[in-house]
Amino acid sequence: MNERHLRVGLRERGVSAKVLLLDDEAPRTSAAVWEALPLESQVYHGKYARNEIYALFDAFGDPGSENTTITPIPGDLCWFTFAGDLGNPAYGYDEASAAKQHATVIDLAVFYGRNNLLINGDVGWVPGNVFGSIVEGLSEFAAACQDIWMGGARGETLYLDRWEER
């Protein structure tokens, strides 16, 4: 299979990066994401995993576990499926996200720094499917992610679409 690439970006901050889909390592997850593109939703910054931003989407597939990790590295894109386990008020989702808290949702996450550990105090280890790797633009994207941590996520969206040269 030829290499396939995505663009992952932050709409309001005007930054994006090129992602290599890991078709060989995570074929089912890569296919599910590719077929669902374009995707865009409110971005959040991780509370537990450390250097992570993510967005929640209505369920659009179930690839099962493949190419999983609990220690993602900078540039990894991961898929998580949560089936009604986001309802804890400590997670801090607003009313617009309330319906998703008790439904099955897909969490697509981008890890932008080192020393990540996927553990949640409520449920324990949370392995994710690594389906992509940022191959261009990580440093600029990481700076924008750090700005989400320090400046806030309100009004910002994470998007993924098929890579086209701009």
Image (tube, grey):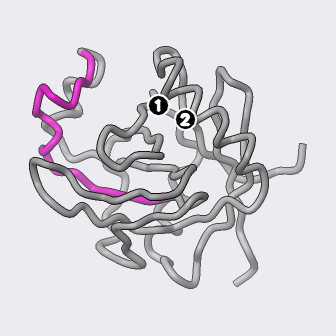
Residue drawn at point x = 20 percent, y = 23 percent: 98
What amino acid is labelled 1 in the image? Val
Q: Is residue 164 left or right of residue 81?
A: right
Q: Which mark is residue 43?
A: 1
Q: Quadrant of the N terminus?
A: bottom right
Over which residues does the magenta segment extend? 78-94
Question: Where's residue 18, x and y in %?
Answer: 74, 54
Left or right of 163? Residue 82 is: left
**Residue 150 in the image, given as x and y percentages of width and height:** 51, 23
Quarter holding residue 103: top left
Who is closer to the viewer here, 109 or 39? 109
Q: Residue at x 73, y 27 (%)?
A: 14
For the C terminus, give its image quadrant.
top right
34 up-or-down from 41: above or below = below
Name the side, left or right, on which 61 lies relative to 42.
Answer: left
Q: Position of residue 95 (x, y in %)?
A: 24, 15
Q: Say if mark 1 contacts mark 2, CB within 8 Å.
A: yes
Question: Which amino acid is tagged 2?
Answer: Leu
User: Label 2, on which residue?
Assistant: 158
Question: Which of these two is toward me, 115 or 142?
Answer: 115
Give SS at disc 2: strand
